[in-house]
Each structure stands twice: as C-alpha cells, then as structure tokens.
Image: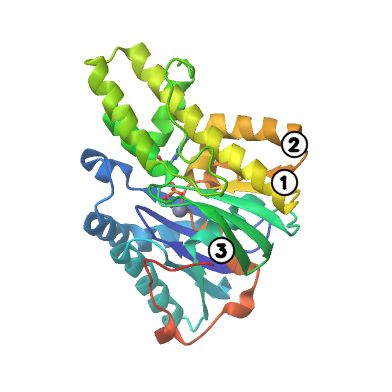
Amino acid sequence: MILAFDTSCDDTSVALYKDDKIYSNVVSSQNDVHAKFGGVIPELAARKHAEVIAYLTDEALDRVGSDLKDVNHVAVTVGPGLLPSLLVGLSFAKALAYANNLPIIPINHIEGHIFAPFFNKYIEYPFLSLVVSGGHTHLFYVKNFGNYELVGKTLDDAVGEAFDKVARVLGLEYPGGPVIDKLSKNGNPYQFRIPKGLENDKSFNFSFSGVKTHVKNLVKKLDGLSKTQIMDIAASFQKASIDVLIEKTVRAAKELNVKIVSVSGGVSANSYLREAFKKASEKHAFTLVLPEKEMTTDNALMIAFTASLDVNRATWEYAKIEANPSLRLF
Ligand code: KG4
Ligand code: ZN
C-alpha cells in the first residue's frame, strides 16, 4: 500500500493506493483562498497546506479502513511546483516515513499527470501524452515508463493560465477554466475571431500569451460587455485554444506513427476538449485515453499510482530527496 502526497501548487491532496479496488483520494481545494487575488499566492498556499495535511492523511486512511501499519511506501511530489508548497508535502512525508520506518518514492508531478489517464487501465507503450494544466502545456512521446521525449511545449503561457487570464479580463471568477467551460455552452464560438498561437508553425510548440492580449483589446474596443458577448468571447477563445492543441497533437501522432494519445492535467476536464478530442480520435483512428474527471486536476492518487509502476525507485536516503520547483522530466 502506497501513501502519497501532492502539495505542488494550491491543492492539498493525500491518497492511498493498493490496487484497482482499494484506494482513496482526498483533495482540499484552496480556490476560495486565492480567488480574490486572481491567482495563487505561494505563501498563503503553503500555510493552508500545513494547516490541513495531517487531517487529510487521517481522512485518506479512514476512507479505506486502514492505518499507517498497512502502508509499505510513501510517495511524494518533489517538483515542479511552488517551492513553499512543495516543502510542506515533502517535509510531512519525510517525517511520517522516518517515524514509521518507510521508504520514500519521489515523484515528478508531470509524470503523475502523464499516468493519471491510465489509472486502473492497461498501459500500452508507446503513447503520445498531452499534459495541459495551469502550469504546463507539454506534448510527450512516452516510449516506456521513465522514458519520455519532449515533442512540443508552450513557448510562453500554459493553456490553463490563458483560461485563467482571459476569465479575469472578462470579469469572471478564478480559476477561469471551469467557468469559461460552463459559459461557452451557451456562447457562439464563431462570433469572434480569436488567433490560434503558432497555428501554421511546423513545430509542435504552442503559444498562448497573444490570446490574452487579443481578448483584452477586444474588450476595450467593445466598451462594456453584455452577458451574450461574454459567453461568445468565452466560447470563441475556448474553441481557438483547444482546436490548436488538438490539431498539433493529431499531426504529431501521425508523424510519429503513434496510435495511442492521452490527455491530462486540469484543462483535460474541459468538456469541449473531451468531445472534440473524441471526434478527432474517430476521424484519425487513434485510441484516446482520458482521465476520470477527479484525476484531471491536481491530486495525490495520480502520484500514488505512478509510484506503484516502479516501487524500486523507493529510497531510505531521505536527505538526498529535495524539492525542486523547476524539476525536469526530459
Ligand atoms: O492540473 P491543475 O489542477 O494544476 C496545475 O498543475 O496547474 O490545473 C489547473 C488549471 C487551471 O488553470 C484551471 O483553470 C484549468 O486547469 N481547468 C480548466 C477546467 N478545469 C480546470 N480549464 C478548462 N476547462 C476546465 N473545465
Ligand atoms: Zn498539475
């Protein structure tokens, strides 16, 4: 049984994983703490993690009727993320592991996202993995467990960050992704022409920084927005950003001759993305693997599950495990 922690950003999460039947995943969201600032404040995030992590650990154990004696490994996210946040989870994991004489499996948060869609599913290699979250927009060619090649990435903002920034410009709440998703359902995606960053570029890289500026200028020009205009801008922005992700991923799958494509990270919760990717998978004949909704945004179950794929990574040399805010996977 693996007990896992993820405190990489603004959600505190503790999970237990034994097999496809025995697991728990407890997440405490900090959205209300950061909403009034329109983004995550690292110091506040760390304080909140420290406040709740012990309670969440009890809850994760209680949910499967286990206690610490049943745990064989501790897994913890060591990066990338916000340093003050990462340190809370890592310090807690080390203390708990030391007190209970357990080895620790350090996990890269992005690797957790890559495997989240495969939770309790058969993993077939190679596959193409699109990780889309508030901090990342990465396209990986996954040859095997631990063998990742970066195919493309954003050259500036992450796509989730673009959702959050555009929402702010439209006067909507934080985080912007879920609210833009909801409003877009009643908006006309063809009403406004929103540019697709690096659309005609031959690489598999992305760019989302121009979109925010475009929407900002559009809002200024319109000088006061009606509810309909907000919904139309949301839908037009959502379609432009998601379509370019899909077009490039499909082109990469064809060029690399990969038949399995997975999508993960907070933005993979987006309903338009899920629907449009399903259509693309039928049209272009590839297998699409999407995570359960609760495994899209940050959670510790994806960390526990990823740790379970190679427990030989476990170590008792706690002093060598360090938090690294810019930890790379490739
Ligand atoms: O994976 P995640 O929880 O945290 C990071 O590692 O960044 O992703 C959070 C991001 C936020 O930018 C949020 O706006 C976005 O995921 N998000 C969505 C949706 N739900 C969350 N974006 C679009 N549509 C959604 N339904
Ligand atoms: Zn994440």
Q: Residues within 10 Å of mark 2 (few under 14, many from 20)?
A: few
Disc 3, SS: helix
Please tell me whether mark 1 or mark 3 is closer to you in this view. 1
Q: Which image quadrant: the C terminus? A: bottom right
Nearer to us in this view, 322 or 226: 226
Depth check: give the residue in front, 65 or 31. 31
Quick check: 102 above or below 330?
A: below
Q: Is mark 1 within 8 Å of ligand 1?
A: no
Q: Residue type at mark 1? A: Lys
From this viewpoint, is residue 276 visible?
Answer: yes
Q: Position of residue 110 (x, y in %)?
A: 51, 59
Q: In the rendered structure, which amino acid carries the disc numbered 2?
A: His
Question: How much space separates mark 1 and mark 2, taking CA atoms?
Answer: 9 Å
Q: Which mark is residue 254?
A: 1
Q: Classify mark 2 as within 8 Å of ligand 1 or not, answering yes or no.
A: no
| x then y, percent, for residue 184 | 45, 22
Q: Nearer the viewer, mark 3 or mark 2?
A: 2
Q: Identify the residue under disc 2.
A: 284
**Apparent side of residue 236 relative to residue 146 in the rendered image (left or right):** left
First along the sequence among labels 3 and 2: 2
Q: Are dots 1 and 2 in contact, CB under 8 Å?
A: yes
Q: Nearer the viewer, residue 131 or 53?
A: 131
Q: Position of residue 263 (x, y in %)?
A: 59, 46
Q: Where on the picture, by quarter, is residue 23?
A: bottom right
Residue type pointed to by label 3:
Ala
- Location of mark 3 (residue): 304
